[in-house]
Amino acid sequence: MTNRWLLGAVAAALLGSGCASAAHSGLERQQCYDADTQLATFLGPLEEGRSGGCATYPIECEKLRREIERLSLVCPGHMPTLLTNAVMAYESGQSVKAQQFLDRIFERPGSHPDAAILRSRIAVEEGNIPFARRFIEQQILLAPDQAALRETHAGVLYLAGDGEHARIELNAAGELGAPRWRIAYHLGLIEEAQGRMETAKRFYSEAMAGNPDFAAAKARLNGLGRGAK
């Protein structure tokens, strides 16, 4: 999981945090003041540090992580803080802890796409493909217009050996706004798995045309015996 994913997930959650924050009790509101600003204050320097500074100043970065975890206690209903803690726990190899934060998010009614994607990813890494499939399908029922959920569902279907339905979900994700180069790459994986190598190459080439720096697509092309320019 990349730093960019973390920033994107938290930014998306911040945009939708108003309703969740409004549901806080009076006591929570007294203890939790402007959680969005507090989180941004910690998260900004941490993200900068993760690009290299944390290797030089690990103690400072650990302090920031602890502050973000503390914020989850002070503002227990603040979704972006819970999501940030879940991602940090996941990235540090603490999947159980990550799931605990995610469970707190899912206790709240409504759709939580970014949290759902992370939960499905953990299930896949644990080898529990059936759970990941059921879970993401339940989340799609809550938010059928979320392209990222459709992409995740396609990935789970692909791992389950259901390439045809994975293709359908990828096309749906594209119609909902997912980047075409990313859709093309995953379509290439499906075609390659089904033995249609020339079609796979065309999709990988399309992915590289849309994102020339996409190393994964270049690697697949090279692996199929056609080096990318």
Image (cartoon, helix red, strand yellow):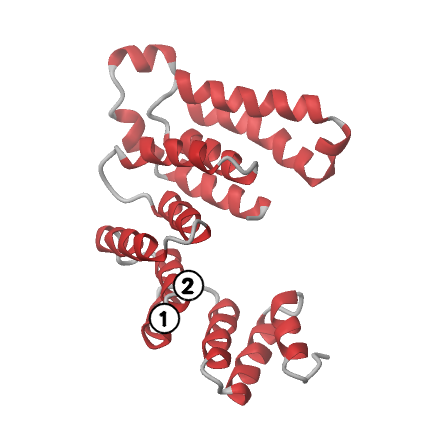
Residue 206: quadrant of the picture: bottom right
Q: Is residue 169 left or right of residue 97?
A: left
Q: Amino acid at mark 2?
A: Gly
Crowding at mark 2 (Cα within 10 Å: few <14, some 14-19, many 20+): many
Query: Could you say which disc has been placed on residue 137 in the image?
Result: none
Query: Could you say which disc has been placed on residue 155 in the image?
Result: 2
Q: In the rendered image of this protein, does residue 112 appear above or below residue 205? A: above
Q: Quadrant of the C terminus?
A: bottom right
| Closest to the observer, 23 or 72 | 72
CA–CA distance in space, label 2 to label 1: 7 Å
Q: Is residue 26 left or right of residue 154?
A: left
Percent x, y of residue 28: 31, 14
Percent x, y of residue 9: 46, 44
Residue lying at 55% horizontally and 21% vertically, measured from the top left = 66
> Which residue carries the number 1 mark?
166
Q: Amino acid at mark 1?
A: Ala
Residue lying at 53% horizontally and 80% vertically, measured from the top left = 203
Would residue 84 be seen by someone viewing this image from the given angle? yes
Q: Is residue 83 left or right of residue 135?
A: right
Contact between labelled residues 1 and 2, with CB atoms less than 8 Å apart:
yes
Q: In the rendered image of this protein, does residue 76 appear above or below residue 114? A: above
Residue lying at 51% horizontally and 67% vertically, measured from the top left = 182
Q: Earlier in the sequence, mark 2 or mark 1?
A: 2
Would residue 33 be seen by someone viewing this image from the given angle? no
Q: In the rendered image of this protein, does residue 4 appear above or below residue 25? A: below
Crowding at mark 1 (Cα within 10 Å: few <14, some 14-19, many 20+): many
